[in-house]
Image: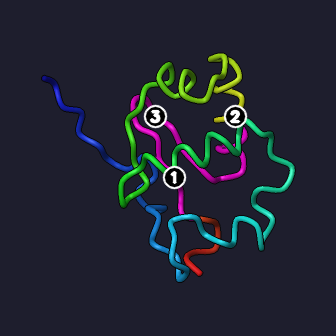
Amino acid sequence: MIRTEKRPVVPGRVRKVPGAFSWVDHRLVREGHIDGKSHAALALYLFLVTVSDSQGLSYWSENAVARRLRLELSALRAARSELEAASLAAYSAPIWQVLELPGGAA
């Protein structure tokens, strides 16, 4: 079995556990980071937060993520673009990275 070495796509933005009790930082809502995002982008963000390791990294294939979220590949890529534009996630095949929210940890 070939193992993929996971490295952060954006090393300076490795997420940290927020002051609250969960991986989902309350600032997503409080600071409006999710405002105006599509349902597909929000589903993708939740999926990535759920499957990522402590650095926010995961290596699910685009096809596997699309199947799990019941999205066409083009819709998944559009959702990914939304998250990248909002500086919430980064992708460099095969690694996904959930980014620390802009402004640092709460």
- Under circle 1, the secondary element is helix
Kind of residue sitting beneath label 3: Ser
Q: CA distance from mark 1 to mark 2?
A: 15 Å
Q: Position of residue 72 (x, y in %)?
A: 66, 16
- Under circle 2, the secondary element is helix
Residue closer to the observer: 33 or 87: 33
Based on the picture, tell me whether residue 67 belongs to the magenta stretch. no
> Crowding near pointer 2: few (<14 within 10 Å), some, many (20+)?
many
Q: CA distance from mark 3 to mark 1?
A: 17 Å
- Residue holding disc 3: 92
Which of disc 1 and disc 3 is earlier in sequence?
A: 1
Q: Classify the position of the N terminus by image quarter.
A: top left
**22 with respect to 29 (left or right):** left
Q: Position of residue 86 (x, y in %)?
A: 71, 51
Residue drawn at x 70%, y 45% is: 42
Kind of residue sitting beneath label 2: Ala
Q: Position of residue 77 (x, y in %)?
A: 64, 26
- Residue holding disc 2: 79
Instruction: Examine the image and state in which quarter residue 4 appears.
Output: top left
- Residue holding disc 1: 49
Which of disc 2 and disc 1 is earlier in sequence?
A: 1
- Under circle 3, the secondary element is strand
Which residues are the magenta region? 81-100
> Crowding near pointer 1: few (<14 within 10 Å), some, many (20+)?
many
Residue drawn at x 77%, y 39% is: 39
